[in-house]
Image (cartoon, rainbow, N blue to C red):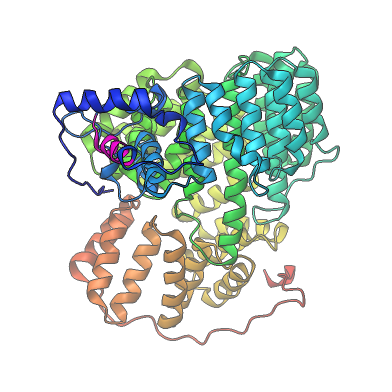
Amino acid sequence: MRRQRRKRFNFPNLWKGLICLVLMVSLPLSGGVSADKKPTIIELALIKALSAYAGNYDLSAAAMATAVKDETGANLGVFAYEKPIDAIKAGDTAAFLVAIKTEFARTGEIRPISRFALSVDHAAAGNYDDAITQIEPLLEDAESKDFGGFVSAWFLSLSGQPDRAIRQHREIAQNLPGLTGDLSLAGLLESVGRTDEALAVYAAITPSEIVAPKHRFDPQALIFSHIRMVISRQTLLLQRKGQLEQAQSLYRKLAAAEPERAVAYQAAIESLATGRGLENGNVTPAAAFSRALTDYALSLSFQRRLSGALTFDSANSLDETTSVFYQLALLIDPANDVLRLNAYEDLFDATLYDGALHILRTAPEPSARLKMAEALTLLRIANTDEAILAIESSLDLASEDQRLEIYSGAMRVYALFKAQDRALELATMLPDLAQSEADMAMAYGLSSAVYSQFGQFDEALENARAAQRIDDTHERRLVVADALANAGETDAGLLILRTEALNRPNDPYMLNTLGYYLILHTDRLEEAFQVLARASLLAPNDPYISDSFGWVRYKMGDLEGALRYIEHSRSILAPQRNWEVEDHIGDIYWHLGRRDEARLAWTNALEEYPPKEQQALIAEKLSEGLSGPPPAVIPLPNLSLSRDGQVDRQDI
């Protein structure tokens, strides 16, 4: 991302000191100018001067640690960004906070989100009374009183007033979105040592009967993900209290509901007994508050994404509110790697790579996971040398419990580099790092993908089968089917997919897998069309299903129809890109006479790390173009759907 930079005033040091002195004496900026009084001309001039000042603002140390620096080491300052949210996109929470103050100085008004941001900065500095004062006006507003009560309850807890905090939180908990109120209350109780009450809250929101979704598009999937989250927190608390059998019994209930993940749940049960891989220290009020803010942001994000899905908005565009919440939560708990990676992924997924990298590099201490994420980001901005250094640093920092995770991450990044020898060296090491059956299956599965990336299909099949022998699940069987096709055993792979589809006749991803396999490995285009049409009907806004349905139309000579579906896929993925989607649309553009757009699409495809064999084919197209006419026109078949739109088993 290229940031907008504006010329910053360069005050002499004497003027900088005088400005700061006047502000410290007469204008408590970190507390906010009174919302009931418009700033004077002098106050306005002073705040604007502060906005341009490159030194330390009147913010918490945690906020100042986020400031983006220029090449001289000075803060870029708020004038580097056109709007406050642009500072968030750069990971510059300090500039965001100063921009809020400047905005208030200019307008005399302060919005609820701005009050919230400034109050969190107070709390990060340990100024809890000021934090509560800043948030109090929200309690008088009908639209924001519940959120204000939620935040101020946590400030009361941080200030050492747990009883008041809990009373206030109980009053508003049921008015918060989703499970936010219950999860936050449980976290608050746990953080102040009232663990039995916390467990009672968790138990109240854990259903006695757990029903797993049939597939990822099943509406039950959202409910089930919430149940798993509640149980994961509940079991950690039970384990810390020594109630091991009760904790393990919850995972057994999950395994009974979702036998496909039984091996993974067994690994969780073993971890509870050994403590391996668990971060099971007591939860501090600061850590619990930051987690509650994350839960709140995720709940709001889900509501917006659901609305976006209904209005065809891109799922990958930046959710600005979520990013603000994440970065403010980091002020409270800057050493929390999980939270920092959430904030990072928000920017990375929106292709804001500079900001994502800044979020990682402003952590108080480096860690293996942060360094691995840094390597991936450096790879995206084509900084190969630094990416390799970050990978090796990640490997050095990995703890015993993290080695499989970090080594597999390094293997995948090296595969993207096309560093075949190093990637395959790590692939051979992974099984030896496994400490459970779930680990072993994961190690073989990841190694299979890397062997396939480099065209070593026999080794890919061997590893895929090894993973399936340990963990014989739907996903493992799909990987084996794909590996069989790549190794030349197309019919054997197709038999597996047909069997899986019969067991999941209305799973859009299963139908997409079968349909795309038919396109790639057989001449059964009419059957592929029918299967993919049904997948598209069930999941019209999934980008990969839309791409598959467009591609079968291309293969049947329907160029305009193909273009419509694959452009739709492209728009859903934006700003991210997928090499297959770009490769497909390049072929369509070429045959429609749009040669420059075709070459641009193929260039995009090469930048998205296609497998070794496909990389060579796309490079050839980019150089030579496509020879010959487009695919011959085949009449599109009629579709047969049952009355409720479901796929009949006999249609597979």
Q: In percent of the image, x 74 and y 70: which residue is there?
A: 648
What is the span of residues highlighted in magenta in the rendered image?
Answer: 44-54
Residue 45 in the image: above or below residue 283: below
Does 46 appear in magenta? yes
Query: Is any atom of residue 287 visible in this view?
Result: yes
Quarter occupied by residue 624:
bottom left
Q: Quadrant of the C terminus?
A: bottom right
- The reply to whether the magenta stretch includes residue 42 is no
Determine which quarter of the picture holds residue 566: bottom left
Query: Observer-nearest residue: 487 or 431?
Result: 431
Q: Which of these two is toward me, 488 or 518?
A: 518
Looking at this view, is 75 or 530 the one in front?
A: 75
Decide whether the magenta segment is chiefly helix, strand or loop.
helix
Query: Exactly how many numbered labels are in the figure?
Result: 0
> What's the residue at 30%, 83% (across, down)?
629
Q: Is residue 382 left or right of residue 362?
A: left
Give percent across and percent down for residue 555: 43, 76
Place of residue 53 in the rendered image (x, y in percent of width and height, measured from the top left): 24, 33
The residue that appears at 22% across and 63% down in the rendered structure is: 620
- Farthest-out residue, right: 208
| Residue 515 to residue 209: above or below | below
Please name the residue shown 53% across and 25% down the image. Answer: 130
Q: Is residue 166 left or right of residue 433?
A: right
In this picture, residue 421 sits left or right of residue 402: left
Q: Is residue 443 visible?
A: no
